[in-house]
Image: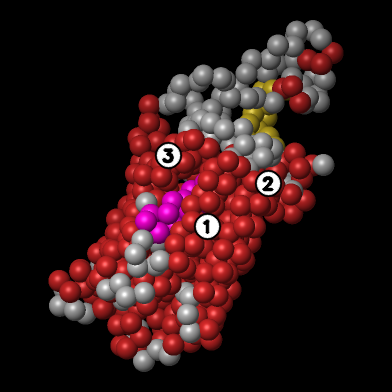
Amino acid sequence: MASEETRTLKSTTPPGSATARGSAITRDSVAAPEEGAAVPATRAWAVRLVVVGIVLSALNLRPAITSLGALLEEVRDGLGMSGSVAGLLTSVPPLCFAVFGVMAPRLARRFGAGAVVCAGMVAITAGLLIRPYTGSTAGFLAASALALMGIAVSNVLMPVIVKRWFPDRVGSMTGLYSMALALGTAAAAAVTVPVTEALGGSWQSGLTVWAGLAAAAVLPWIALARDRGAAPAERQAVQGVSGHVHARVDGAGPVRQVHARVEPPTLRITRSRTAWALAVFFGLQATAAYITMGWMAQIFRDAGVSAGTAGLLLAVTMVMGVPLAFVIPRVATRLPHQGPIVIALGACGLAGYAGLYLAPAAGAWAWAVLLGVSNCAFPLALTMVGMRARTGAGVAQLSAFAQSTGYLISIPGPLLVGVLYQHSGGWGLPIALMVGLMIPQMAVGVLAGRDRTVEDEAAR
């Protein structure tokens, strides 16, 4: 069976009509995919492989960060890293996500989204293999940046791949992806220290083991990178669609096919209020997430909780995203407005912060659960990226804009918490900052959840 990209429609123009005799190609003659067309059997394997690739990729998008957090003290001692440089490490991930994430759509247009994600997984593998053995702080930072570069481009392109391959299952597939991401995050936080101890106590070995998981994620994308065809669910590329048109020249001879590439107009994403609201929402939820990953265990330890229990509490916070990251996107896609979910998640965050301030040790498990629920604003943001644009090109631009701008917004947060903690000698001011950021997060999230598309807003 021919693919949808080469399928053409029969001309409905009578042979003797003026249109048939003319040489001009009209808009109505552009071929379109037939509704309900069957997916070629030869491409069924690709759909299953994409699901495997999405899950394996998502598992690798956070261990580079949370595994380091679990062994940060050992890394500092081993490399002679100062406290200020260690604090800088907490802001390197969002910085890399902002800088490298904006390159993803352009790379996808040139090489294909699958090839770029494949290269991203290779970069993660290489960075995780190299950084424990560089022997210097500069080398460690450079190798970390390499891994984070791979994470950045994959972050941006995952919603694009979901939109292209599963346009009628954006919620469920985003939920599956987000659930795997949360599982990888929690696993790295929970098992890195035990694995390190099992390997003889070497922090280098404890960090290197995560390169094996990243290497496994390369395999499905190798096959998908070689398959440059469009997705069976949506034959539209990241930018532009191609088709065939019919034209009859001089009223004689058979209908000939003329290949035409139809390029959509450039989307001026910065004209969309929804795009800006989604970018700010993404940035504020990322700020809360990185503050939680970087500092929550320390809050519990300062309250008298043991180091081992504090690590488990952080793992509980991270693992809350496993079931909820699958449920929330499915619910979100069934609602005309995602504002109520934004409010509910924000309320959980405010309750968790209040508990950390009033009784951090007494209700530690409850606060960990509440903050874990609040952190599920991340899969909600990814789901809204897929819902606020109509086309694959729009999703690519919106994903790059929202994530790059959002991660730039999130850079100062973890550093500012550290500064406030150091100068105040307690957690009152840092927690007040977290509360102050949650309120605008809820406000812009409500705006981003309105039922509209960035294409319409940019056109106006």
Name the residue beneath numbered marker 3.
327
434 and 354: which is toward the camera: 354
Residue 402 at x, y = what percent?
A: 62, 55
Could you tell me residue 281's position as x and y percent? 61, 55
Mark 3–mark 1 CB contact (< 8 Å): no
* Res 150 quadrant in image: bottom left
Residue 281 horizontal side relative to residue 370, left or right: right
Q: Which contiguous range is marked in magenta?
A: 366-380
Q: Are marks 3 and 2 in contact (CB under 8 Å)?
A: no
Callout 2 secondary element: helix
Which residue corresponds to the image point at 38% horizontal and 26% vertical from the top-left? 41
Q: Is residue 251 above or below residue 263?
A: above
Q: Which residue is mark 2?
A: 447
Residue 294 in the image, given as x and y percentages of width and height: 43, 71
Secondary structure beneath dot 3 equals helix
Callout in the foreground (2, 1)? 1
Q: Quadrant of the C terminus?
A: top right
First in sequence: mark 3 vs mark 2: 3
Instruction: Bin the neighbour count of mark 3 within 10 Å (Cα to Cα): few under 14, some 14-19, many 20 and up.
Output: many
Numbered circle sitting on residue 350: 1
| Point 54% across, 43% down: residue | 341
